[in-house]
Image: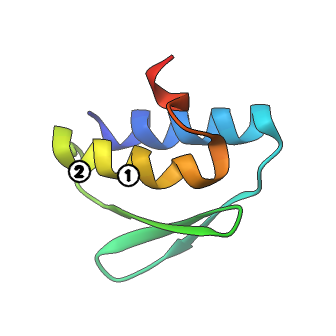
Amino acid sequence: MRRSELIRKIRQEARRQGVAWRQVEGARHDTFWLGSVKIPIPRHAEIGKRTTEDILHECEAELGKGWWRN
């Protein structure tokens, strides 16, 4: 999945549910805070399927189980 698509998908759902979403730049990853959950996202243009799924699973703590499968 494209990095920009992944970030857009999470950001839109966070906005829809009223959950805070902010970005902090790091050395090799950008760190995003989704509510109280810290989510590192690599800076690669394309992110592998397994990594994408892991990132989406991390978001479930704030956005609810299975939100990304809709």
Q: Which mark is residue 55?
A: 1
- Inspect this view and state whether residue 48 appears: no
Q: Quadrant of residue 67?
A: top right
Q: Which residue is mark 2?
A: 51
The reply to whether callout 2 and callout 1 are in contact (CB within 8 Å) is yes
Residue projecting furthest to the right? 18
Q: Which mark is residue 30?
A: none
At 54% from the left edge and 38% from the top edge, which residue is drawn? 65
Residue 60 or 51: which is nearer the viewer? Answer: 60
Q: Residue 22: where, in percent of width, then height?
A: 67, 62
Image quadrant containing the N terminus: top left
Q: Quadrant of residue 46?
A: top left
Mark 2–mark 1 distance (CA, rounded to whole Å): 6 Å
Label 2: element kind: helix
- Inspect this view and state whether residue 39 appears: yes
In the rendered view, tell whether residue 35 sits above or below residue 51. below
Label 1: element kind: helix
